[in-house]
Image: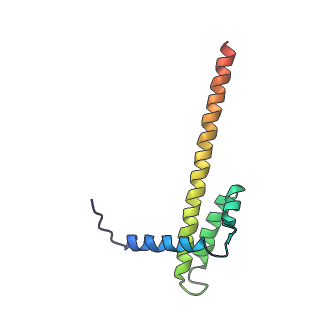
Amino acid sequence: MSIDYKYNEPKLLKEIAEYIDETYTQHYSLNRFQATEFIIDSGMGEGFTLGNVMKYSQRYGKKAGKNRKDILKIIHYGILALHNHDMLESNFKEYEHARAKKIQENSNYDES
């Protein structure tokens, strides 16, 4: 089934991917690690990514006018926020599964 996109989504998604690709070669990347990785790994990813979404949303139209790059940054930080969310959800589910298994094991131990 072919989708009749109305808002130029395929072209815009390609542009977003190209923008994100560029960030991996810029000064934000130190020895192939980005500062964002360290921030997410330290548990501050949600505040950092959503804070940057807010920052660039507030800045749009004020610094350098209606700067298209600010919108790309909003989208990129939104993607990073989704990644952080998925990591936290995955880790929480793994934790809950391990906890339930431990409770079950202890319950079986108590019955013996």
Quadrant hosting residue 27: bottom right
Residue at image coords 58%, 67%: 77
**In the visual, does 31 lie left or right of 60?**
right
**62 or 5, which is in the foreground?**
5
Number of numbered callouts drawn: 0
Extreme-left residue of the structure: 1
**In the visual, does 111 lie left or right of 66?**
right
- Residue 101, position as x, y percentages in the image: 62, 29
Q: How is the image coloured?
A: rainbow
- Residue 102, position as x, y percentages in the image: 66, 28
Q: Is residue 90 above or below residue 98?
A: below
Quadrant hosting residue 45: bottom right
Extreme-front residue of the structure: 31
**Quadrant containing the N terminus in the rendered view:** bottom left
- Residue 40, position as x, y percentages in the image: 67, 58
Extreme-top residue of the structure: 112
Residue at image coords 52%, 81%: 68
Extreme-right residue of the structure: 42
Residue at image coords 58%, 60%: 81
**Quadrant containing the C terminus in the rendered view:** top right
- Residue 15, position as x, y percentages in the image: 46, 74
Quadrant hosting residue 69: bottom right
Q: Is residue 77 above or below residue 100?
A: below
**62 or 31, which is in the foreground?**
31
**62 or 70, which is in the foreground?**
70
Q: Is residue 90 above or below residue 46?
A: above
